[in-house]
Amino acid sequence: MVHKKNKMRFKRREFIKLGGITVAGTIMVPPLLKSCKGSQLSNDTESYLHHFEVTLNQLQEVIRTAMSKGADYADLFFEHTLENYSGLEDRKVNRAYSNINFGVGIRVLKGEQTGFAFSEDLSLNAMLNAAKTAANIADSSAKSIPINVTEYISPSYYPVRVPWEGTSINDKIPFLQRINDKIFDLDTHVTKVNATAGDTTSYILFYNSEGLLAYDYRPMVFMYVTCIMEKDGKIENYTASRSSRQGSEFLTDELVDALATEAVGKTQILFDAVKPKAGEMEVVMSAGESGILLHEAIGHAFEADFNRKKTSIFSDKMGKKVAESFISIYDDGTITGNRGALNVDDEGNPTEKTPLVKDGILTSYIHDRISAAYYKVKPTGNGRRQDFRNIPLPRMRCTLMENGPHTKEEIIASVKKGIYVDTFSNGQVNIGAGDFTFFVKSGNLIENGRLTKPIKDINIIGNGPQALADIVMAANDSRLSDSTWTCGKDGQGVPVSMGLPTVKIKKLTVGGTNA
């Protein structure tokens, strides 16, 4: 398979100017490791060194300093990110701002201990001082580092046609204005529209004490809109959103129409919505956005650091049955254009499609470098960090359940009394015990095998491992949610996505009314 790769051949100062940038598309072979002697690096790698205005000799000197007190391993994570945001309120685009993140994080490992420092100054002296700080985690004689360099030439899971560097705010404003006008045109009860669009472009350069040199160019874009309506003295609202790793080709009239139609349609339904009677009942979770169940209630408990520390309820379940045999779950970083996609993780490891549960059996945890070494397996490409100021952790990318043997219609018809849920606003989970609470924005009652009255603003409460075991039906309609999901862990946020087919859980607690 061939992929399109974006070559970035301009320096940081040119990037900051944001003017007249062009991107050359080339045909890219699948990922490979290229051994380079001396300074015989590829043109792409040289362009990233020039972008950060560093040399390979400097990187090696910083690594030697980081390893000077006997560390087992050290790495350098360079980042240059430009963020742009613009927003609409009161029928006009009236706010915009940009932010630049620039620097290097230096990590040192000694056993399972981590030393870390970062610098926003990439002068050699500043990097060496940071490396000395990180090196203090160790206290023995220095270890040698490789002379040869191995370049990781990655695929591109997020090809860009029109880069954000060459897209001005004047190109973005019309789409925010159109979505505002479209929503007001769709319903006379609309009283207010809030819309926000944002894009980021990141340049990443990675080097470690094993001689691995990798780079990545990471685009990201999102748009979300909140529709607020008033009817007969009642006020309701709904937020629709989309996100992707794309360039400004993401902004289309079709996107505007889809977001506006969803926001208005979902808000209209809420005026007639009721709350079900509270108690335990069967719950049918819709395809797509209900993947939040996988992410929050189950996925975090699959992250290897929680299992290595024995805080996850799945820490003794490897190779054991955790779900029905028709259930398979994976975490995938290779889905083209997906918000959770990665060409290479933040530890220089190749990304992949990692089977977590296969035919109901737990087959893998989600690994970074530290946990992979502990379990004596290869990293799964899930070492992720919010930015250069943070250390990498095992984090999800896109967590998805595969199709099951049933249909949505069969599942709904099998429920005599329960609820169908399709939109969530937030949730929380206790990783250790696996207990979770999700706030459901919208859905429907299920009565005698039929969807009936719309419901809103309820909680569903359960236990993640038990909920996984209690999935008794799964449909053949698995799909991704392309919303603006961001995962929080240990104070760090990273972009993710998730997905699910329609599933039936035989028992969850629903917080509704007592009447």
Image (cartoon, helix red, strand yellow):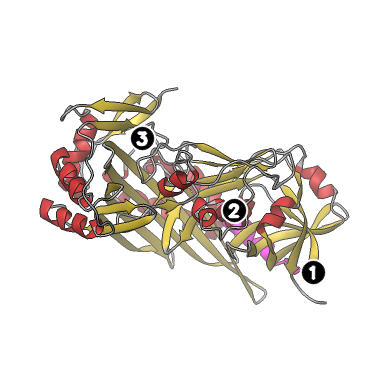
- What residue is rendered at 80% in x and 65% in y? 280
| Badge 3 density bin: few <14, some 14–19, many ≥20, Cα 10 Å | some
Determine the image quadrant of residue 452. Answer: bottom right
Q: Is residue 311 visible?
A: yes
Q: Quadrant of residue 229?
A: bottom right
Residue, x 18% and y 43% (percent of image)? 59
Q: Which residue is mark 1?
A: 279
Q: Nearer the viewer, mark 3 or mark 2?
A: 2
Q: Amino acid at mark 2?
A: Ser
Q: Using the image, tell me which numbered label, if any, was put on residue 362.
A: none
Provide the residue designation for mark 2.
315
Q: In the rendered view, would you say 151 is above or below 55? A: above
For label 1, the crowd category at 10 Å Cα-Cα, with few meaning under 14, some 14 to 19 and many 20 or more, is some
Q: Quadrant of the N terminus?
A: top left
Q: What is the distance, in whole Å, between disc 3 and disc 1 at their CAs?
A: 51 Å
* Front-most of residues 489 and 289: 489
Read off the magenta span: 261-278
- The first of marks 3 and 2 along the sequence is 3
**Looking at this view, is 275 or 185 the one in front?**
275
- For marks 3 and 1 on the same chain, the one whose residue lies earlier in the sequence: 3
Distance, label 2 to label 1, CA atoms, is 31 Å
Please give the count of numbered marks on the rendered protein. Answer: 3
Whether 445 is drawn above or below 407: the answer is: below
Reading the image, the residue beneath label 3 is 161
Find residue 51 and report its horizontal and vertical position in percent.
Answer: 19, 42
Direction from residue 57 to residue 260 in the image, left or right:
right
Query: Of all residues shown, which one is farthest toward the front?
Result: 140
Q: Position of residue 515 (x, y in %)?
A: 83, 77
Q: Magenta includes 268?
A: yes
